[in-house]
Image (cartoon, helix red, strand yellow):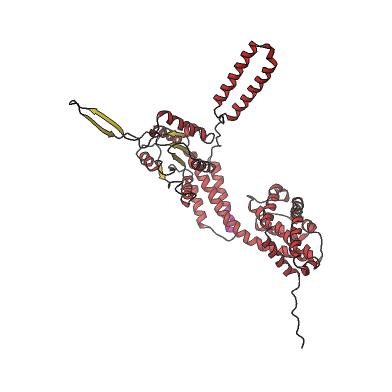
Amino acid sequence: MLQRPILIGGVGLAFALWFLQGWQESLAHLGEFSLMGAIAIILCLWLFGKYRPKQQVQELPVNRETVEKAIAQVQVVADRLETENHPTPELREKIAQLEAQIDRQEINLAITGGKSVGKTTLLQVLETQPQERKLCLSETAALFSEVETKTDAEALQSAIASDLILFVASGDLTDSEYQVLQQLLANHARIVLVFNKQDQYIPDDRAAVLYSLQQKMQPMLAAEDVVAIASAPNPLKVRQHQTDGAVEEWLEQRLPEISALRQRLEYILQQEAQQLVWATTKRQAEELKAEGKVILDGIRRDRALPVVEQYQWIAAAAAFANPVPALDLLATAAINAQLVMELGAVYQQKFSFEQAQTVAGTMGSLMLKLGLVELSTKAISTVLKTNAVTFVAGGAVQGVSAAYLTRLAGCSLIEYFQQQEEAIDSASGLNLDKLGQTLQNVFQQNQQVAFLQGFVKQGLGRLLPAPQPQLKQS
């Protein structure tokens, strides 16, 4: 595959020159070669655009306002936990720590990479270098010692928690190294890729490896963020001829060659230090918010599921006593509107009864559109057919189907409400695409045969009277 635009452009130019020369030599073939030349030029331009390196994609810089907003969102979660009678002093303490480190001056720098790439030596060298800004240097455990070990996850987490990461490689990137770099960048980590042990390559190969690293990391890293060093160069053999003709040889240790890295670090610390601290604080706030939300969601889910179970059996009893199509029940019955209101109260979503009716109708319409009503009724009918007595019981299919569809609606609303950052004031605030996707996901989770069999059995136990024991005749 052609990968260098200059090569592709050269081929196109050569073809164009050949075409012009042929045009001058033979006007008779003008039409044929004009078409060929035009096609070739268009093809070359397309290839050039396709393989041209993309421009560096720079994220918008993090500012103090975005950090304070992220911390405020954690405070909202803490407030909601206290509203649920679940005080979290540890969460409050961590919030205070985040607020205190917004103006932190010290920069945390982590060195990570695979085994035997020179992490420890680089750490020792950097510790001896004078820095205008205070650095807190650390080294993670070696990556890739075993496939997907817990150590790897801990090392990556430690690196992501720092302000700046030096990812050390001793040559061109392996697939594993490239994947880890992508993972770090996906977590918005600030990275400098360090090509260490460059002294072990001849000059031409050294330049080729550095160029390859820079090309592979485009557009994720700027070329300036890929540097070549030798933290511990191999000793240099020195030979000295004595006056008496004897030759004396010894190995002379060389100083570390880290000027490129030192210059890049100086630039970053001068230009980006405050943003590095803000970015780290924002990441930590987002992680803390996620931790708090897991606790909050668990508490609310424990409150919401009994509500869903209560209304699913109410819907089942209503449909069993007066069989109607399940869709009509979901779309119009006050039972489901009341379910929406109670679930909304659990998740701090404000609905009037009229708005709750609209939400219930929307859920019913989505179920019909997605084919969930028909699929659910067929699945329940199939389970009921295994028992002829229960199948012929009037309204059994409608009753159990109504309970099942009400459960789908309730569980879908639970999942949907958990994803909402702020309260919804009306049904018009519903995201129908997200709600539809949530319905499909919940439906898939509740389609297992074992679950359906258990659900039908539980429903029949509530709908049908228990058989009376027969009296023995004397």
Residue at 54 percent of width and 45 percent of height: 68
Q: Position of residue 64 (x, y in %)?
A: 53, 41
Q: Is 115 on the left or on the right of 25, as rendered? A: left
Q: Is residue 364 magenta?
A: no
7 or 214, which lies in front? Answer: 7
Q: Main secondary structure of the magenta part?
A: helix
Q: Is 75 on the left or on the right of 136, as rendered? A: right
Q: Position of residue 226 (x, y in %)?
A: 46, 34
The quarter of the rendered structure image containing the C terminus is bottom right
25 or 223, which lies in front? Answer: 25
Q: Is residue 306 above or below residue 8?
A: below
Q: Which residue reaches farthest bottom?
A: 474
Q: Position of residue 128 (x, y in %)?
A: 34, 39
Q: Is 237 on the left or on the right of 106, as rendered? A: left
Q: Position of residue 312 (x, y in %)?
A: 72, 63
Q: Which residues are magenta?
A: 77-87
Q: Is residue 136 above or below residue 45?
A: below
Can the viewer see residue 5 in this picture? yes
Residue at 20 percent of width and 28 percent of height: 246
